[in-house]
Image (cartoon, grey):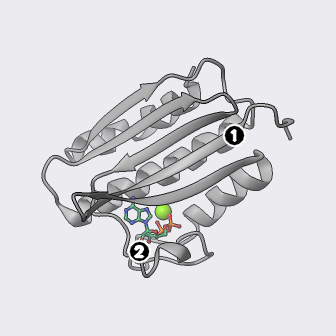
Amino acid sequence: MCEVVEKATSIINKTLKMNGIKLNVLCELNAPILTHPNELVQVFLNIIKNANDAHTKAKKENPYIKIKGYETKEEQIIEISDNAGGIDEKIICNIFDPYFTTKDEKNGTGLGLYISKIIIETHCNGKLQVKNIYESGELTGVKFIISFLKNKPII
Ligand SMILES: Nc1ncnc2c1ncn2[C@@H]1O[C@H](COP(=O)(O)OP(=O)(O)O)[C@@H](O)[C@H]1O
Ligand SMILES: [Mg+2]
């Protein structure tokens, strides 16, 4: 039941293919996410587009973006991860700030993650978090985690 993910990936799939980025989607959610679907699609697009940008800049071998949807007893969780080299620990606490960007004027407004956080946490009653991924001590990528409490009222 990942219609939202399907919709977002169908929009951006061509771009990823063109850039040689492998998209891996695994969805094990048993029920649809009960919140504003169009806004959620926008959030997924923002996060996937950022991973695409990071890959285009990093030019690593075997670039991928993985999307994994699953649930625990209390939560529905969707994780979006990549192997594009991660985010410098010195700035990772700033990425949700308005107008924070490491891109040039043409490519970045610094609003994507700021707006995504508002959509998930203020409009959709969920949580949006980020974590760097380390493999044998080396910073290899980043993971965005979107979670919704199952028993929270829909707003
Ligand atoms: N997947 C990622 N890998 C590396 N850096 C990222 C990733 N996603 C976001 N970032 C960093 O977070 C910053 C803010 O992202 P965002 O709010 O979408 O603004 P923008 O894309 O316009 O720069 C980016 O400029 C980039 O430095
Ligand atoms: Mg962005």
Residue under the image location 19 percent in, 44 percent down: 20
Residue under the image location 54 percent in, 77 percent down: 94
Callout 2, which amino acid?
Lys
Q: Is residue 50 left or right of residue 61?
A: right
Q: Is residue 33 left or right of residue 68?
A: right
Name the foreground residue: 93 vs 100.
93
Q: Position of residue 125 (x, y in %)?
A: 78, 46
Give the crowd class for mark 2: few <14, some 14-19, many >=20 residues within 10 Å. few
Q: Single out the mark in the foreground, 1 or 2.
A: 1
Q: Is residue 58 left or right of residue 71?
A: left
Dot 1 lies on which element?
strand
Give the crowd class for mark 1: few <14, some 14-19, many >=20 residues within 10 Å. many
Residue under the image location 68 percent in, 35 percent down: 37
Name the foreground residue: 52 vs 106.
52
Does 85 sit above or below residue 75?
below
Q: Earlier in the sequence, mark 1 or mark 2?
A: 2
Residue 106 circle label: 2
Going by the picture, which residue comes out furthest to the left? 61
Q: Position of residue 66 (x, y in %)?
A: 36, 40
Distance from the alpha carbon under mark 1 to that under mark 2: 34 Å
Residue under the image location 66 percent in, 23 percent down: 32
Callout 1, which amino acid?
Phe
Residue 29 circle label: none
Residue 148 circle label: 1
Q: Position of residue 106 (x, y in %)?
A: 41, 74
Does 30 sit above or below residue 130?
above
Q: Is residue 78 left or right of residue 67?
A: right
